Image: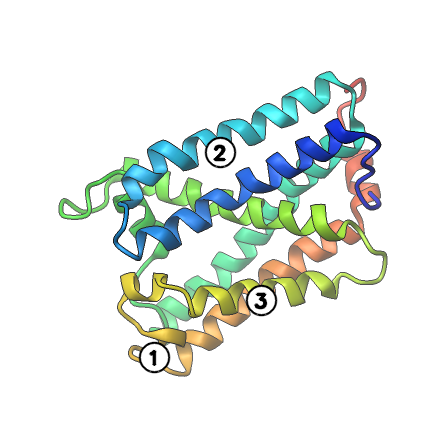
């Protein structure tokens, strides 16, 4: 897959709406950390509609036979999902063996999204939290691919992007929710940032590598006739 081809104003509009939709969830989590709105309210009124809009664009693009946009969105699901798995492997190691994290961020997102922070996590909140976590990985990957596209031999651009995302995370109001301070200096001043950076780099390497080899991957997974 090369850079997304925007042949007309309709394509430009679709990609812009899709990029905005993909950015809603991480922005909502950050906004909830300010105390202006609860994450539950933002989830119902912004995240769910944004996810529906994004997948509606995928279906609409398939109906229009816009293979460029369909391939980009399918690649984002594949690469973003795989990248998030890589991220979680590193994060789990840091959490379990080096006590680098105060808890599970997806589980925290789950109890806040389902408005049961005081009750605690259960199977439903965990499913919602992990679903939103993977959606964020897919969304950020989509934003990257929409802006950069596939540049052969430059998978490391994904790593640079992932480092920027990780840095933004560690200086965002989300640190207030976690109670660790910026860059985790109040919890684990070395282990926390090291784990966050390594986890995000693992995500960037994974989706960057998949994007670099996307022509072969799409050829293997693409449903003919779309």
**Where residue 175 sits in the image (x, y, percent)?**
34, 66
Image quadrant in which the C terminus is located: top right
Distance between mark 2 and mark 1 Cα atoms:
35 Å
Q: Nearer the viewer, residue 4 or 127?
A: 4
Residue at the bottom extreme? 190
Residue at the left extreme? 118
**Where residue 108 sits in the image (x, y, percent)?**
30, 52
Tell me the number on the disc at residue 166: none
**Where residue 69 sits in the image (x, y, percent)?**
74, 33
- Local secondary structure at mark 3: helix
Report which residue position mark 2 lands on: 50
Residue 113 in sight from this viewpoint: no
Q: Earlier in the sequence, mark 3 or mark 2?
A: 2
Q: Earlier in the sequence, mark 1 or mark 3?
A: 3
**Above or below: residue 147 compared with residue 68:** below
Q: Nearer the viewer, residue 226 or 14?
A: 14
Residue 33 in sight from this viewpoint: yes
Mark 1 burial class by Cα count in 10 Å: few <14, some 14-19, many 20+: some
Report which residue position mark 1 lands on: 188
Horizontal side, residue 218 vs residue 117: left or right: right
Q: Are marks 2 and 1 in contact (CB under 8 Å)?
A: no
Report which residue position mark 3 lands on: 164
Task: Count every numbered label the image shows and give the total.
Answer: 3
- Local secondary structure at mark 1: loop
């Amino acid at each position: 897959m090369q850079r997304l081809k925007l042949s007309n104003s309709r394509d430009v509009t679709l990609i812009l709406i899709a990029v905005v939709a993909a950015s809603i969830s991480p922005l909502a989590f950050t906004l909830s950390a300010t105390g202006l709105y609860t994450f539950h309210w933002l989830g119902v009124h912004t995240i769910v509609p944004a996810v529906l809009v994004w997948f509606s664009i995928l279906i609409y693009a398939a109906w229009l036979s816009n293979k460029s946009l369909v391939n980009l969105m399918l690649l984002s699901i594949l690469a973003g999902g795989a990248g998030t798995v890589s991220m979680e492997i590193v994060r789990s190691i840091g959490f379990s063996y080096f006590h680098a994290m105060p808890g599970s961020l997806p589980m925290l997102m789950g109890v806040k999204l389902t408005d049961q922070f005081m009750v605690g996590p259960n199977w439903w909140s965990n499913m919602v939290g992990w679903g939103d976590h993977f959606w964020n990985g897919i969304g950020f990957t989509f934003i990257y691919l929409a802006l950069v596209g596939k540049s052969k031999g430059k998978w490391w651009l994904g790593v640079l992007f992932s480092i920027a995302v990780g840095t933004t995370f560690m200086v965002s109001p989300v640190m207030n929710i976690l109670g660790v301070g910026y860059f985790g200096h109040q919890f684990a001043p070395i282990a926390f940032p090291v784990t966050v950076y390594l986890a995000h780099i693992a995500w960037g390497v994974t989706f960057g590598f998949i994007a670099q080899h996307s022509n072969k991957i799409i050829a293997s997974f693409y449903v003919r006739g779309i």
